[in-house]
Amino acid sequence: MAEIHLNKVHKSYGADEVLHGVDWHIRDGEFVVIVGPSGCGKSTLLRMIAGLEGISQGEISIGERVVNDLEPAERDIAMVFQNYALYPHMSVYNNMAYGLKIKGIAKDEIEKRVNRTAEILEIRDYLKRSPRQLSGGQRQRVAMGRAIVREPSVFLFDEPLSNLDAKLRVQMRLEIKKLQERLGITSVYVTHDQVEAMTLGHRLMVLNGGYVEQLGTPIELYERPATAFVAGFIGSPSMNFLDAKISEDGKKAVFPGGDALDLPGDLAKHANHRVTVGMRPEHLQVDEGKSETTSQTVQVVEHLGADTLVHGTFGSGNSDLIVRLKGIRTIGKGEVLPLAIDPRNIHVFDPDSGKRLDS
Amino acid sequence: MVEHRPIVTFVSHLVLIFGVAIIAFPIWITFVASTHEAARMVQIPLPLLPGDQFFKNLELTLFKGLEGAGAPPVGFMMVNSLVMALMIAVGKIAISLISAFAIVYFKFPFRMGFFWMIFITLMLPVEVRILPTFEVVANLGMLNTYWGLSIPLIASATATFMFRQVFLTIPDELLEAARIDGAGPMRFFVDILIPLSRTNIAALFVILFIYGWNQYLWPLLVTTDQSMYTVVMGIKQMLEAAEQSPDWHQIMMTSLLAMLPPVFVVVFMQRLFVRGLTETEK
Ligand SMILES: Nc1ncnc2c1ncn2[C@@H]1O[C@H](COP(=O)(O)OP(=O)(O)O)[C@@H](O)[C@H]1O
Ligand SMILES: [Mg+2]
């Protein structure tokens, strides 16, 4: 059990800086997820915590110890790799036992621990097999087993599910979550998949190009994204972004076609400024006879069964807009849907810096 | 492309049989010669079918040898050859494994410099550097020793390159997993790299054993003492036996015996050998 402190952590490869100062306090027993697009530095950060990459600047501590100069094996961590990295010439049992053997743990204690872990992960039947003889999902379990059996104070996961097929991924995701709750071990999980991040993490770090965009719980990120990047990254289909201007009194967003929407608060200090307005597809609903606020001209309709995705253009302008309606709707092409949105679900961002604008 | 016309089958078999005959016929003659008495082997025409002296010749060659030619019993020379070939094969593999390990997994000053130095030794086989090497071996007092026979042949750029290629195919994540498991460099080398190179080591062993066994020029130079003669140079020695016609039955028996160990090595290690040269998945 341990907390992790990241203190102004930088990473450079030669002259290239790929992480520009990360601060984070991960609490004991917490499950946190680092999420971001490919190449944003997620793995690099995780590997710095693991000790597989040097720390160019700043400090990382695990528990009470600053670990900057400690070898991976001395950091009391365990890591699950994307490609599992099982030792191909060792049986499943030996894969799990190898680290314990090196630590000099007694043979019968090793056997007890491996068996107990194998029990938890339901891989007892494969202990004698070699990794070659296992399916992807089974290898994944063995890789987790190898981490669990060490009884570390921190688990590190680097996209552990991305080599599995979609169905197995959902199933393993749930298992990882249950397992972490059961063991209560501080875990850092890296993924590029926002659904995985939202479902697994107690808290998330959204990374973009080596900068931390936002830290927060999944609900905070969804309800109050700090930047347009986070707003667009979290949620599927992605948030609609529309160019607009704040009205004179700061109470409305006015769109190029002349439409206007009420804002959640008073943005008078940004009056007459250009802004980006964000609205999630699921927050736009068909206005049933109430005062219509805006509309959508329908182009394409996609039926997902539980939901219907309507693609079209916003109001009287020609910006793209996606709306997600509950249930099955019969909507024809060219139809004009009257739409309403609760002002509290409207997000306003600075078009240049991408930062959220609040009253 | 698979053809089923009989003429194609016929011609391809003909070619194959012809090829086999070219290779097999001299070996057959060697075998036949080793089964006759000395006197029969100097009569024309030479026999094409085996005689009945095989076991007698075998015993004579193995345990007594050609006394007149100043060669020790062939059994003795075979032991020398075996020791030399094993020392060369094992030594080459050990040195190349370690140097490839250093080049692939460690950062040290002039790493590429060392790499190229090893590369350059490809251009300097024993035959090219034979005089200076002889000088060194002589000054170290290693003439007429197993060390003198094998050490100068041990350094191997080819094997170093092969292991370097093998190590480069091993995913980095494996090294990282081992580091997290607490394995230091030597543990990683012994517990993970060597087992993963197992089949390559076997393939290389076959090639190097044969290379060592067939050495001729170098043993000829560094051994003056009969007790250190190797079988391959011994054959030549027997041919040069002065003041008498060559004892073909014994010479051929010796050749036959000299061929056997490489054949055994290939046959017993064939499975690993093929896997070592073709396997790509790690
Ligand atoms: N060993 C390295 N040398 C130079 N640049 C690297 C190295 N490893 C990663 N990078 C760069 O660092 C950035 C972040 O990489 P990474 O952490 O692997 O991204 P991801 O978020 O996809 O896991 C990338 O731009 C990558 O090109
Ligand atoms: Mg990555």
Image (cartoon, coloured by chain):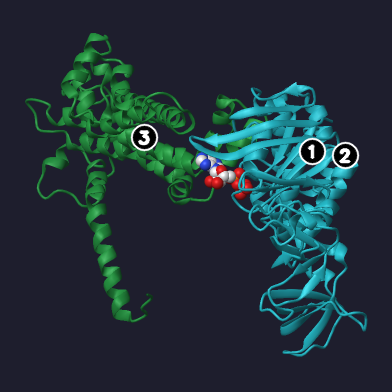
Judge left or right: residue B136 versus residue A275.
left
Task: Specify few, some or many for label 3: CA neighbours under 10 Å numbering under 14, 14-19, or 20 or more.
Answer: many
Q: Is residue A149 above or below residue A191?
A: above
**Cα distance between the residues tagged 2 and 1:** 9 Å
The chain letter under disc 3 is B
Residue B20 spot, x, y in % from top left:
28, 58
Could you tell me which secondary element the residue under label 2 belongs to? Answer: helix
The chain letter under disc 1 is A
> What is chain A's hue in the picture?
cyan
Tell me which amino acid carries mark 2. Leu
Circle on res. A148: 1
Front residue (pair A253, B76): A253
**Residue at mark 2:** A183
Circle on res. A60: none
Marked residue nearer the N-terminal end (2 or 1) = 1
Label the green chain with its letter: B
Tell me which amino acid carries mark 3. Phe
Could you tell me which secondary element the residue under label 3 belongs to? Answer: helix
**Cα distance between the residues tagged 3 and 1:** 46 Å
Task: Specify few, some or many for label 2: CA neighbours under 10 Å numbering under 14, 14-19, or 20 or more.
Answer: few
Q: Is residue B211 above or below residue B74?
A: below
**Cα distance between the residues tagged 2 and 3:** 55 Å
**Residue at mark 3:** B209
Is any atom of residue B193 visible in this view? yes
Residue A150 spot, x, y in % from top left:
77, 33
Q: Residue furthest front?
A: A248
Judge left or right: residue B143 versus residue A306.
left
For marks 2 and 3, give the one nearer the viewer.
2
Q: Which residue: 45% across, 34% down?
A: B104
Q: Which residue: 27% across, 45% down?
A: B31
